C-alpha cells in the first residue's frame, strides 16, 4: 500500500534551491516501509526536483548554469503570448524535471554521501509549493 504525504514549502522564486532531504527522510520513517522506492514530485511547470551536493558553492554554480542556459532576461515566445515574464522558468523546469525516484533500502534512502534531494523554484516570484512524497514497497 503506498504511503503519501504532501509538503508545503515556501520559496523565493528566481532559482531558489531548497534541501528537502530531512523532510523526505521523516516521511519515510513515518511510512513504516523498509524496502521499495520513494517518489518526490512537484506539480507545476516552473519548479523541479533533483539531487545535488547541497552546499553554497554548488547551489551558486547550479544557479549560474541555469542563468546561462535560460537567462531571465531572454526573449521568450511564452512571455509574448502570456505576458507573465517567466518563460525562462518553464524552460529551466523542463530541463531538470518535476520528479525523482530514490531506492529505499532497509528503511534508508539510497543517496550518496554528499547527495541531497532539492527543490528548485525557477518562477519569477515567491510561491507556496506542494511537494508530493510517495513511499512504495514493503
Image: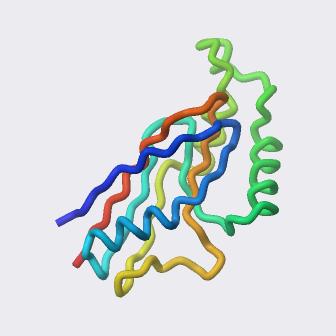
Quarter where residue 23 is shown: bottom left
Tell me the residue at 69%/43% (across/down): 15
Number of marks in the rendered image: 0
Give the percent coordinates (x, y) of residue 55.
Answer: 73, 65
Residue 45 vs residue 115: left or right? Answer: left
Q: Which residue is drawn at 60% across and 34% down?
A: 90
Q: Is residue 30 left or right of residue 108?
A: left
Is 32 situated left or right of 80 in this image?
left
Q: Where is residue 45 in the image (x, y as percent from the top left)?
A: 52, 36
Q: Picture coordinates of residue 63 (x, y %)? A: 76, 49
Quarter occupied by the N terminus = bottom left
Question: Which percent across, then down, holds residue 71?
Answer: 79, 35
Q: Which residue is drawn at 45% across and 77% down?
A: 109
Q: Which quarter of the figure has residue 121? A: top right
Q: In this view, does 8 lie above or below 110?
A: above
Say how the picture is coloured: rainbow
Camera-side residue of 136 and 11: 11
Which of 127 and 122 lies nearest the eye of the viewer? 127
Q: Taking 121 as reference, is 137 above or below it?
A: below
Q: Which residue is drawn at 55% across and 63% down?
A: 117
Amino acid at each position: 500500500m503506498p504511503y503519501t504525504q504532501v509538503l508545503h514549502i515556501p520559496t523565493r522564486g528566481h532559482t531558489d534551491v531548497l534541501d528537502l532531504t530531512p523532510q523526505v527522510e521523516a516521511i519515510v520513517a513515518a511510512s513504516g516501509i523498509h524496502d521499495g522506492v520513494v517518489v518526490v514530485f512537484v506539480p507545476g511547470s516552473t519548479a523541479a526536483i533533483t539531487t545535488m551536493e547541497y552546499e553554497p558553492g554548488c547551489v551558486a554554480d547550479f544557479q549560474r548554469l541555469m542563468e546561462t542556459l535560460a537567462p531571465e532576461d531572454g526573449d521568450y515566445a511564452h512571455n509574448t503570448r502570456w505576458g507573465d515574464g517567466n518563460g525562462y522558468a518553464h524552460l529551466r523546469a523542463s530541463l531538470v524535471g518535476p520528479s525523482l525516484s530514490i531506492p529505499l533500502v532497509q528503511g534508508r534512502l539510497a543517496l550518496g554521501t554528499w547527495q541531497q534531494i532539492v527543490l528548485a523554484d525557477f518562477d519569477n516570484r515567491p510561491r507556496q509549493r506542494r511537494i508530493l512524497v510517495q513511499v512504495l514497497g514493503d
